[in-house]
Amino acid sequence: SASLIAKAASFASTVAIARTVGRATLGVGTLQLDELLFLGPLVMTRDGLRKVAYRINDDGADAAQSLVNLCWITVPVAIGLGLVGARSLWFNRTAGDASADARFARAIAYTLVALVLAMVHEPAFLLTQSRMDQRFRARCETAAVLVKCVVMVLGVVLLSGGIEAFAAGNVGYAGVLCLLYLGRAFRGPGEGEAAAEGVRATLLPRRTSSGAWWQSNTLGTAKEFWMQSLQKWVLENGEKVVMVFFGTDEQAGEYALVSNLGSIVARLLFQPLEEMALATFGKLQALAGAAGTEKEQKLQARRTMHQAFSVLMRLLLLLGLLFACFGPAYSHLLLHLLYGSAWSDTTAPRVLAWYCSYIMVMAINGLTEAFVQGVATQEQLRTYNYCMVGFSISFLCAVMVVLPFVTDAPGQPMQWHPVESSD
């Protein structure tokens, strides 16, 4: 229920903002500040360790400390990527008056502050995730999303803050998560939290009981997932990078609107199922591969894993077919009712119609990817990453080839559909 409340609030705020600001402001605030400058460095650096946390079948101090130590390595990398991105966006900005440049500079600064806050609470988040405390995570995420929505709507609709409101929303989002996760970590163990004892000490880098900074198996798996996160980010966001640096802000606004609206189904239905599947597959695989597990328990874990995969695949396929069959016919009506003729009279309805068919592909891809990430060995993950390199290169080449054809007509939005999952 908490997750549904957060997603409903996010959708309502997006509608209110889209009806208030122009396409250019929406494009800069959503694609440049939110997707690229804030989420980009985070996804490339932290998502790998988050997947590793699902695969740990141990609540001991060494496993937790390995995660924390590896997490602190990503902090300077994420901040460095943020600074490079900020510099690139600044020199790529549309030339304007001094006031517009000052607003854009402040928006970039606020976003970098949000990036730092997000990295500070990441060790506490990893410890929570490794213990499968999904209830606390859902409460934190809901509170953070609600704060972000309120800040953005107030800043855009009431205060006319423009792109600075988008950046302030990210600061509020990261700040709430930072307070909640660090507050729980430093609070110490409470009722039902015996495994959390010693969390305060593990939030900073420290050697494990063996004298090493991390466990070798944790480092090996983390490296594969880090490489995979980088390749996946290129696959999922390559078209956004091209949109920002080769398209116009208006085109970026139309793309952002359709992408956010079309991906609601993925965020609302597919993402929770895929995260649950990844956690389930990872823990069952850890149980099946544990040295002290009896043979019958290993066989039962594998049977359970295959049965869960089969049931979820059928469910997601049926949901995807539902949207592919009925979504295109109602895309124009939906945009007109939500955003008015200013958006429905553009080519956005046609893009949304194609996105409805794309949802079915996302459903299948997301679940199969969760299965691979949950059960694959390091060697299999390495092979998977090599394949992802080829897919990334092919995708970016395709974007660059198609780009001249989709920008011939002025004012028309560019349309790309990369292979991605809903997580």
Image: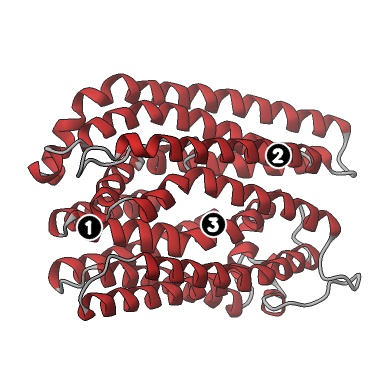
The extreme left residue here reads 341
- Place residue 399 in its image quadrant: top left
Q: Report the residue at 50% width, 73% height from top.
A: 83
Q: Report the residue at 63% width, 36% height from top.
A: 390
* Left or right of residue 37, residue 223 in this image: right
* Left or right of residue 86, residue 187 in this image: right
Amino acid, disc 3? Val
Q: Which residue was labeled with disc 1?
A: 24
Label located before the other in sequence (1 or 3): 1
> Relative to the observer, which residue lies in front, 141 or 333?
333
Residue 39 visible to the viewer: yes
* Left or right of residue 330, residue 200 in this image: right
Task: Classify mark 3: residues with Cα within 10 Å, few (<14), some (14-19) or many (20+).
Answer: some
Instruction: Say which of marks 1 and 3 sits in front.
Output: 1
Between the C-alphas of marks 1 and 3, the distance is 25 Å
Label located before the other in sequence (2 or 1): 1
Amino acid, disc 2? Tyr
Q: Report the residue at 21% width, 33% height from top.
A: 349
Q: Which residue was labeled with disc 3?
A: 43
- Residue 386: assigned label: 2
Task: Classify mark 2: residues with Cα within 10 Å, few (<14), some (14-19) or many (20+).
Answer: some
Amino acid, disc 1? Ala
Q: Report the residue at 48% width, 71% height from top.
A: 115
Q: Secondary structure at mark 3?
A: helix
Q: Is residue 109 above or below residue 149?
A: below
> Relative to the observer, which residue lies in front, 118 or 188?
118
Location of residue 160 in the rendering, given as x and y in whole percent from the top left corner: 15, 71
Instruction: Say which of marks 2 and 3 sits in front.
Output: 2
* Left or right of residue 260, residue 36 in this image: right
